[in-house]
């Protein structure tokens, strides 16, 4: 595996683990944040493995469109929805209405966690 990708994936796996721990404690906003971070880092690792310089952004929208190949194409719509978690899960004064239903709930957290696991699985398998 590309050493740059492996470095990014190590950090992504740590974020995934934090999301899992938060899920066990029912801290759903942190599950969503760390799942987002895991995906972000996996995507940035893909970009480096493809010879690109990852942009300094937290927007999955920006990252997913730069990753070459079909590896994540069918997950793109779900990944783009994860951007809604970044700011409201980090700051108590986030703009009202960013998450229409308020803070992320158990369903949001479960979906974010499952998506992060799937992205890391695909990225790892694609780059063995």
Image (cartoon, rainbow, N blue to C red):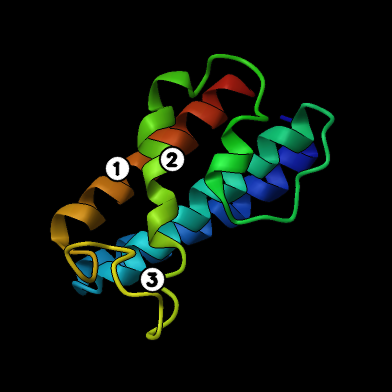
| Residue 69 visible here | yes
Residue 57 point in image, percent of width and height:
67, 55
Residue farthest along the top direction in this orientation: 70
Determine whether the residue tagged by mark 3 lies in a helix, strand or loop: loop
Determine whether the residue tagged by mark 1 lies in a helix, strand or loop: helix
Which residue is labeled 3 in the image? 88
Does residue 32 sit above or below 123 in this rendering? below
Taking depth in this image into account, of 89 and 26 the one nearest to the observer is: 89
Taking depth in this image into account, of 55 and 23 the one nearest to the observer is: 55
Seen in the image, is 102 located left or right of residue 50? Answer: left
Disc 2 versus disc 1: distance between alpha carbons? 15 Å
Which residue is labeled 1 in the image? 114
Sequence-wise, the earlier of marks 1 and 3 is: 3
Residue 8 point in image, percent of width and height:
67, 48
Does residue 76 sit above or below 39 in this rendering? above
Which residue is labeled 2 in the image? 80
Residue at the spot x=40%, y=85% of the render?
93
Residue 70 point in image, percent of width and height:
54, 14
Q: Residues within 10 Å of mark 2 (few under 14, many from 20)?
A: some
């Amino acid at each position: 595996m590309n050493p740059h990708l492996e470095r990014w994936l190590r950090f992504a796996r740590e974020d995934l683990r934090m999301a899992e721990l938060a899920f066990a404690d029912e801290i759903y906003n942190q599950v969503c944040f760390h799942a987002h971070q895991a995906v972000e880092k996996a995507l940035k690792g893909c970009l480096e493995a493809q010879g690109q310089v990852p942009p300094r952004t937290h927007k999955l929208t920006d990252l997913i469109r730069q990753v070459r190949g079909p590896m994540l194409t069918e997950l793109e719509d779900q990944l783009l929805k994860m951007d809604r978690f970044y700011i409201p899960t980090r700051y108590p004064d986030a703009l009202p209405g960013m998450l229409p239903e308020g803070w992320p709930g158990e369903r949001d957290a479960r979906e974010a966690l499952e998506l992060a696991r799937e992205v890391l699985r695909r990225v790892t398998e694609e780059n063995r």
